Image (cartoon, rainbow, N blue to C red):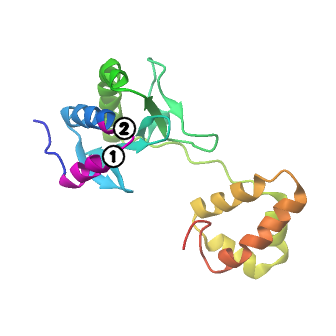
Amino acid sequence: MTPAANPEVDAYLARSRRWPDELAALRALLLDCGLTEELKWAKPCYGHEGHNLVILQEMKDFLALMFFKGALLEDPAGVLEEQGPNSRSARRICFRSVEDTTRLAGVVCDYVAAAIEIERAGLQVAPAPPLELAAELQDRIERDPAFGAAFAALTPGRQREYHLAIADAKQASTRAARVDKYAPRILAGKGLRDR
């Protein structure tokens, strides 16, 4: 039995200007796969038995069907892509037309079935290796106990986000300046993007 459509997702689709036809086609396919739909993180999200499996993401050049534990999926069709260089577990399939959704319908259904089995088996993506902080950030942590305690109190994701933003700079002086720039936010217990 196909789960019912969610009115919040109806409203989301009605507002879509970039990929409305592709969204509608993927939505129908995911509901036919027996997934339930909700609006999470302001995007259509599909799950099974309380587990989030996939989310639809409208990008400028494509519509992505992102599998939360995509790194655990086998990819015989060769369609899964990493989200970016710092993405560990998510993988996505990119669609640029309704024809893409039609052509890849069988693959999507097979991958959704595999994602359900991964959840049923309780499989998890391996934990991230310990974070090797940028030297300038590590130096500040070691010489400023209050800063070090505040940084340690941040969630691992927030710590990683600060590290990536700081380490991204090519010059040591820029990395040090970024540490100084972010220090008040870190001391306040806020993440890089928190308000």
Q: Amino acid type of disc 1? A: Ser
Alpha-carbon span between mark 2 and mark 1: 6 Å
- Where residue 65 appears, x then y in whole percent? 40, 36
- Where residue 91 appears, x then y in whole percent? 48, 36
Does the magenta portion include 17? yes
84 horizontally vs 75: left or right: right
Q: Is residue 134 above or below residue 77?
A: below
Disc tally is 2
36 horizontally vs 71: left or right: left
Q: Is residue 192 above or below residue 8?
A: below
For the question of whether residue 49 can be seen, the reply is: no
Name the residue tied to disc 1: 16
Q: Nearer the viewer, residue 114 or 63?
A: 63
Name the residue tied to disc 2: 19
- Where residue 146 appears, x then y in whole percent? 74, 82
Rendered residue at 42%/36% (across/down): 63
- In the image, the segment drawn in magenta is 7-20
183 horizontally vs 117: left or right: right
Q: Are marks 2 and 1 in contact (CB under 8 Å)?
A: yes
Does the magenta portion include 31? no
